[in-house]
Amino acid sequence: MDFVDNRGSASLEFLAAAIGLLVPVVALTVTTSEIASATFAATVSARQGVRAFTLADSVQSGQTAIAHIADLAIADHGLSDVDWRIELDCARRSCRQRGSLVSLAVLIDVPLRFLPALPGIDIAPKVTISRSATARVSTTSVNR
Amino acid sequence: MLPLVAGLLALCGVAAVGIIDSTDLALARTNLQSTADMAALVGAESFDPRRAQFDGHNLVIRLTNRGVRRAVNSFVRDATDGVRLVSATTPDGVTAQVSVRTNWTPPLGSQFFPASFPIEASASARIVFGGGGGGR
């Protein structure tokens, strides 16, 4: 029986397979991790931001509080150089009116660092994560 | 070599599906808990201000099961999508206790998770006049 055809260099095969398989896996893991972090950050920002907004003394101070919370949450989740924005929606004419429902959506653009580098893939170099939360302006607030 | 590569890819795929589905479940629970918290705050404010009394030191309010349920039901209906109110009561006339439920569906189909199953969250809140609001 001839075993010559089955011989090979184990270290060379291992290196070739490791580079070919592990690099995409690591790239996918890093990208997925950033998306998951952005999702958690957006969830926390929306949840805490809408509560802070309904407790704020004015619309401007409420939006400032939302910005502080979003910055803190995004930094806490290890995200850097990401763009984010908010969308406020109030059920009534004034967001400050007692009993008004306020919805806050926090949108975070996560750059896809590895996918644009792959040949033959033409997709947007970012994915937008959106999470929202709704709260009601307190009916017992005194500063309205 | 090929079976090993196929095995590795299969393991990576199963791990990825499990991690993505688990993350989505954790987020769904966080969102539902947030809804329960907000609903409890709404329930804690459902008292009738005309029946509030001043005992010389504090404003004394009285919640009713009917009032809490009506206010919370309205909030859940208007502010959420796919969330059902399980219970909204007041055990002591001051604290509002709320429990809500929704069905979670895994974003990636997998044989490791059922197609859909209910998750539930509870919260309670009470109003403290003069010393700031309270809730959890």
Image: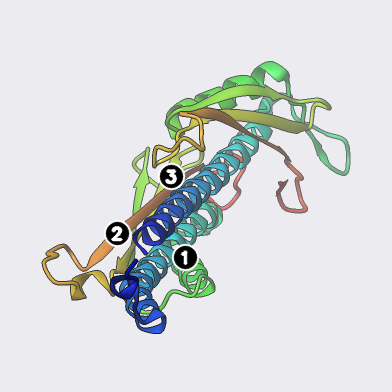
Tell me if B63 is positioned left or right of A73 in this view: right
Res B76 visible: no
Q: Residue at x 41, y 60 (%)?
A: B4
Q: Which mark is residue A128?
A: 2
From this view, report whether residue A84 is shown above or below residue A129. below
Reading the image, the residue beneath label 1 is A61
| Residue A130, percent from left and from top | 36, 53
Q: Amino acid at mark 3?
A: Val
Mark 3 vs mark 2: give the one in front: 2
Res B60 visible: yes
Q: Secondary structure at mark 3?
A: strand
Q: Chain of mark 3?
A: A
Q: Residues within 10 Å of mark 2 (few under 14, many from 20)?
A: some
Q: Chain of mark 1?
A: A
Q: Residue at x 45, y 39 (%)?
A: A100
**Disc 3 + disc 2, Cβ < 8 Å:** no
| Residue positioned most to the right | B56
Q: Chain of mark 2?
A: A
Q: Amino acid at mark 2?
A: Thr
| Residue B50, percent from left and from top | 68, 25
Nearer to the camera, A44 or A51: A44
From this view, report whether residue A116 is shown above or below residue A107. below
Q: Which mark is residue A102?
A: 3
Q: Residue at x 11, y 67 (%)?
A: A120
Q: Residues within 10 Å of mark 1 (few under 14, many from 20)?
A: some
Tell me if A102 is positioned left or right of B31 in this view: left
Q: Earlier in the sequence, mark 3 or mark 2?
A: 3
